[in-house]
Image (cartoon, rainbow, N blue to C red):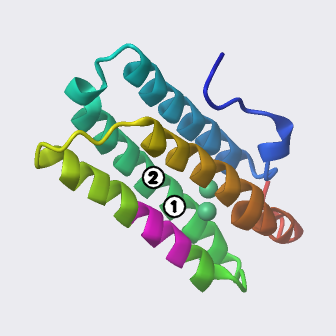
Amino acid sequence: MAFLIWGDQYKVNIAEVDTQHKRLFDMVNEMHEAMKSGKAEAVLGKILDGLLQYCATHFATEERLMTTHGYPDYISHKRIHDKLTEEVKELQRRHQSGEPVLSFEVMEFLRKWLQSHILGADKMFGPYLKSKGVK
Ligand SMILES: [Fe+2]
Ligand SMILES: [Fe+2]
């Protein structure tokens, strides 16, 4: 069974954002698979690079939608994105300095983060953007 299972409860009903969230779920699941098969540390640098790159793309998409449509909670939402980016960068730094970083705790951290950010902050901009005509 997948580590993170996508379901309608995660939809913010903005097509571009939902597609990107699904991809993030897939990436975290791939990371979990790598960990289970024991080859995680060997491929972790690449996985973290991919995750950082995809997070940057995804956060930029959301931030563009929020600023374009004058979303009132933009600043606090962006702050959460910046914090996550820093946390993943820190994992990358630890990995590069030779520390074993992939663990059950890291996977749980990513799972909880994705779930709570989507169900919390991201869900809140869905209706607002819809009301501005975003599909
Ligand atoms: Fe998001
Ligand atoms: Fe977000």
Which mark is drawn over residue 3?
A: none
Assess disc 1: are there few (<14), some (14-19) or many (≥20) residues with their C-alpha within 10 Å of its C-alpha: some
Q: Nearer the viewer, residue 46 or 113?
A: 113
Which mark is drawn over residue 59?
A: 1
Q: Secondary structure at mark 1?
A: helix
Q: Position of residue 11 (x, y in %)?
A: 79, 46
Residue at image position (11%, 49%) is 97
- Viewport quadrant of the N terminus: top right
Q: Nearer the viewer, residue 122 or 112?
A: 112
Q: Position of residue 43 (x, y in %)?
A: 25, 26
Q: Position of residue 78 (x, y in %)?
A: 54, 75
Q: Position of residue 62 (x, y in %)?
A: 60, 63
Q: Quadrant of residue 22?
A: top right
**Label 2 sits on residue:** 55
Q: Secondary structure at mark 2?
A: helix
Q: Is residue 9 left or right of residue 40?
A: right
Q: Is residue 87 left or right of residue 19?
A: left
Residue at image position (64%, 67%) is 65
| Residue numbers of the magenta segment | 79-85
Mark 1 CB near ligand 2 (8 Å cut): yes
Q: Amino acid at mark 1?
A: Phe
Residues tagged 1 and 2 counted as in contact (Cβ below 8 A):
yes
Residue 81 included in the magenta stretch of the image: yes
Alpha-carbon span between mark 1 and mark 2: 6 Å
Residue at image position (12%, 42%) is 98
- Where ligand 1 lies, by quadrant? bottom right
Q: Residue furthest left?
A: 97
